[in-house]
Amino acid sequence: MFSITVSEGDIFEQKGNIVVGFTDTYDTDLSDGVVINPKSVQGQFQRKFYANDYGRLDNELNLALSRVPPIMLESSSSKPRGKLARYEIGTVAVLRQSDVICYATAYGRMENSLRVSCSVDALWKSLTAVWESVRVHGSLEPVSIPIIGSELARVGTLDREALIKMIALSFVSSSRESVVSRKLKIVIHPKDREHVNMIEVGRFLKSL
């Protein structure tokens, strides 16, 4: 058995493990906000757990991805800022921080222009891969996820409510194959709360 809750809050104040969206290049440069936005969930994650120590984070990402070959390498002339190795959308790097596991999922493509893009299919693929990783590494512990795709990597025309439904549906779909976690917590940032009809979301969850 498992449960799904949707609530307003701070993803980093939840108990249990967390999902954080990264791009397919696993860029980490927050220095001037051009490559990665410091206000993004990834930016907040880096500040909280790594104190902007890019070297330590990059070393841990490299270790987590050591058995995952990149699908291509950009040239420094085509992508002058950030990392050059691209990983397949849906790749998950498992990062362990004391008693918290972070599932760093590559759900968006970092264009060479440094704009992030993501399709509905790519998001579904990434979510499916995340749940498989949670199943393998999470020991059924609760896992929290923000509304991935709601900001810089907008997914088509899906609004926040639709993204919440998609996250929940993908979790249920994966859980029907084998239990992923005892509890999924979908966390809405306070600034996004007004964009979500919680009554409608509740109805949707009951229908699953």
Image (cartoon, helix red, strand yellow):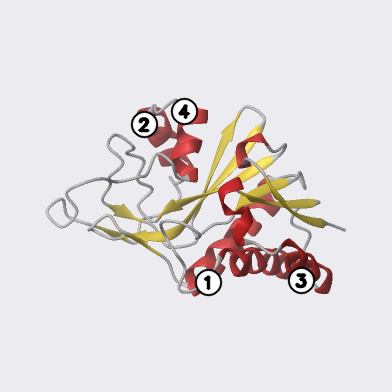
Query: Which residue has dot 2 on it?
Result: 54
Q: In the picture shown, does residue 22 fall above or below 17?
A: below
Q: Position of residue 206 (x, y in %)?
A: 84, 69
Separation of residues labelled 4 and 2 (CA atoms): 7 Å
Q: In the orientation shown, which residue stands out farthest toward the front? A: 194
Query: Which residue has dot 3 on it?
Result: 204
Mark earlier in primary sequence (3, 1): 1
Mark earlier in primary sequence (2, 1): 2
Separation of residues labelled 3 and 2 (CA atoms): 40 Å
| Numbered disc in front, either 2 or 1 | 1
Q: Position of residue 174 (x, y in %)?
A: 70, 66
Secondary structure under tag 3 reads: helix
| Numbered disc in front, either 3 or 2 | 3
Task: Give the amino acid type for the residue marked by disc 3 in the picture.
Answer: Phe
Query: Which residue has dot 4 on it?
Result: 50
Q: In the picture shown, does residue 30 fall above or below 205?
A: above
- Say if mark 3 contacts mark 1, CB within 8 Å: no
Query: Which residue has dot 1 on it?
Result: 158
Q: Which residue occupies 27% across, 45% down?
A: 34
**Side of 87 where 134 appears, left or right:** right
- Say if mark 3 contacts mark 4, CB within 8 Å: no
**Side of 190 where 14 appears, left or right:** right
Mark earlier in primary sequence (3, 2): 2
Task: Give the amino acid type for the residue marked by disc 4 in the picture.
Answer: Tyr
Q: In the orientation shown, which residue stands out farthest toward the right? A: 1
Mark earlier in primary sequence (1, 4): 4
Please rate how many residues cluster around mark 2, counting C-alpha atoms within 10 Å: few if below 14, some from 14 to 19, many from 20. Answer: some
